[in-house]
Amino acid sequence: MKKIFMIFLLPIYIFAYIAYNKVAFVIGNAEYKEGKLYKSDKDAIKIGEFLEDKGFKVYPYTNLTKSSMRRVIKSMASKISKNGTALFYFSGHGMEVDGENYLIPINNSGIDDEVDLADRSISLSYIIRKLQRSPSKINIVMVDACRNNPFAFSKGNKGLTSVPDDKLKDTFLVFAGATKQTIPDDGLFRKKFIEYANKPLSLEDLFATIRGEFRDRGRNGIYTRDRTVGIFKFSGNKPVVYKSKWITPTNSQCTGGKMYKGVCKTKWKEAKNICSSLGGRLPSRDELKEEIRKCGGIIDSYKKNRANKSYQACYKNNGFNNNDWYWSSSAYVDNRGDEGVVDFNDDNYDYAYSSELFDGLVRCVRDGQ
């Protein structure tokens, strides 16, 4: 009797992760089941916008459960380039238990003792170890927590505890308050960080300046530990050398529009004004279509482009990362009130789009490019 062997070939999907030189993971928890906060999520949003302006690829999150926080933390390494800078910022509730610091997710009801707290929260050491195992060269961990104590069982247990230097290789750690102390939910750390990070200060000098301001106000100083090698500054005093002709407006620069999945979206006239204010202009349709071709895309062939994973990864890596229309400077044929747009995702052809009625995405070309 002949034996018949059947071999089933399963499709293999290759997912391309895009790594960045400066990456920030920003979490702000406020909508707690126990001990709701009012500033922490807003602080995280402002920090994220600032870091984006400073050239970081920002992954912002608010009001995360424990499972969501773990997913974010586990994904960090794949988004960081070799010898890059990784920043982790958390605002919300935090607490020390048995010498370990914990960051608390929003689903914190039913925590009756320290054992529950440790089981239901994310340890700071877990986050630091994940960063240390990434390809990064410098890790910056900012914990803007301990805003008050929401748990009746731990009224005598305030704040976070110090972290041994041997646990902080390649890491700069900062707490927004002194150890064993709570801090007000007033956004002061965020305000002072943005103020002084706009100056060409090293991490050590930056947070020393903030510490001095806190003490001048009669507030507990901040806690820092530095185990990094080299000097990092959020703002430098050297001329900027641009690697790309493209300008991507940030949230604070998206005047008259709104951010849609990380990209400025607005009317055509506002898009022109935004580009002009940033020292650039809207691209022509031909310039946008050239970006499609550079990545191996085919104009007016959405089926092939949709199936081309390499093409999709390429245009996203080049900053065109949205399923929507990008404004061009070119009028579409002779249609009055219409301007040309180009879609990078599926239906990547140029088309007429009413400049007065609809919003499109904005990327600008630098003057002289």
Image (cartoon, rainbow, N blue to C red):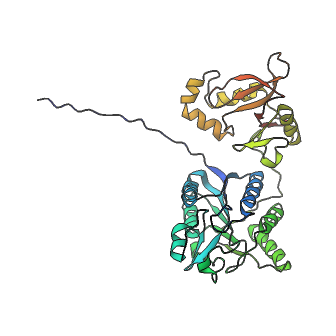
**Front residue (pair 238, 77):** 77
Seen in the picture, residue 243 relative to 146 is either above or below; the reply is above
How far across and down, in percent of the image, does residue 33 sit? 62, 64
Q: In which quarter of the image is residue 18?
A: top right
Residue located at (80% from left, 68% from top): 188
Seen in the picture, residue 362 relative to 113 is either above or below; the reply is above
Q: In which quarter of the image is residue 105?
A: bottom right
Q: Can residue 367 be seen in this view?
A: no
Count of numbered circles on the image? 0
User: In the rendered view of the protein, which quadrant contains the C terminus?
Assistant: top right
In the rendered structure, the answer to whether residue 170 lies left or right of residue 329 reads left
Residue located at (62% from left, 37% from top): 314
Q: Residue furthest top?
A: 334
Q: Residue furthest left?
A: 1
In the rendered structure, the answer to whether residue 167 lies left or right of residue 12 reads right
How far across and down, in percent of the image, does residue 235 sit? 80, 58
Q: In which quarter of the image is residue 195?
A: bottom right
In the rendered structure, the answer to whether residue 219 lies left or right of residue 100 reads right
**Front residue (pair 79, 236):** 79
User: In the rendered view of the protein, which quadrant contains the N terminus?
Assistant: top left
Q: Is residue 74 visible?
A: yes
In the rendered structure, the answer to whether residue 339 lies left or right of residue 97 reads right
How far across and down, in percent of the image, does residue 238 sit? 82, 55
How far across and down, in percent of the image, does residue 351 sit? 73, 22
